[in-house]
Amino acid sequence: MSKIENLVNSASIERRLYLDQLINISEAQAQWKPKPEDWNLIEITEHLFWAEQGGIFGMWKTINAIREGNMERILDSKHKEMPIQQIIELTWQPKEIVPPSAAPRMGGTLSFWVASLNSLQDVLNAFGGDLQDNELRFQSHPHPISGALDFQQRIEFLAFHISRHREQCAKLIKEINSTLRNK
């Protein structure tokens, strides 16, 4: 398996684990919030969709611009060859403010956002099929919080980001179940 296939597969595994935990959640449960300012399961899933869609779009747009000579091929950055976890530790605050482009804003049903997030695996697979191994360390478009990332780090971020919110949802689901048991 190539490096790109491994990276895409990691994101796929995280996506499946995230979506599997939502299988038995009702729409009413998905709307529940511990506090008004917290995100519910629908909002978290919508956020994941917008963040990933924007990330893949940006990567694809950038690699095409590099290939066509409309964008400089950059191989060096302050995060050169760092794993994404280390970059996050260096650049993120404990509670980050979501960039507007990735913020939940439409609402709707959990089932819609689950299907939408699931559909991005086909888009990621297609992008992974287009990207070449020798392009992984070219600098991609900047991340709104972490800044300069290469294509490998950007794809690593997809898996990291889904995993981070999977853990958030697991805690929220426990709270939902505990609240329902106590009623």
Image: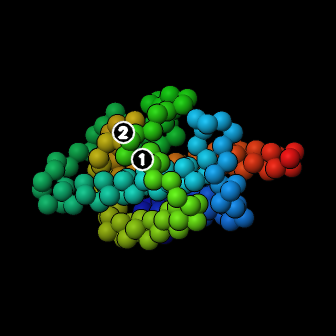
Place of residue 33 in the rendered image (x, y in percent of width and height, measured from the top left):
66, 43
Q: Residue at x 40, y 39 (%)?
A: 99
Dot in front, 2 or 1: 1
125 lies left or right of 140: right
* Amino acid at dot 2: Pro
Q: Residue at x 70, y 54 (%)?
A: 29
Q: Is residue 10 visible?
A: no
- Mark closer to the chain start, 2 or 1: 1
Q: Is residue 68 above or below residue 105?
A: below
152 lies left or right of 20: left
* Amino acid at dot 1: Ala
Distance between the alpha carbons at the discs numbered 2 and 1: 10 Å
Residue 144, numbered circle? 2
Label 1 environment density (alpha carbons within 10 Å; few <14, some 14–19, many ≥20): some
In the picture as drawn, the residue positioned furthest to the left comes out as 69
Front residue of this view, candidates 89 and 15? 15
Place of residue 123 in the rendered image (x, y in percent of width and height, measured from the top left):
40, 68
Q: Residue at x 45, y 38 (%)?
A: 98
Kindly check if marks 2 and 1 are in contact, taking CB atoms under 8 A apart as contact. Answer: yes
Place of residue 147 in the rendered image (x, y in percent of width and height, measured from the top left):
34, 37
Residue 102, numbered circle? 1
Label 2: which secondary element: loop
Place of residue 161 in the rendered image (x, y in percent of width and height, measured from the top left):
52, 48
Residue 86, numbered circle? none
Label 1: which secondary element: helix
Front residue of this view, candidates 98 and 112? 112
In the picture as drawn, the residue positioned furthest to the right comes out as 182
Q: Quadrant of residue 69?
A: bottom left
Q: Is residue 100 visible?
A: yes
Q: Residue at x 46, y 33 (%)?
A: 97
Label 2 environment density (alpha carbons within 10 Å; few <14, some 14–19, many ≥20): few
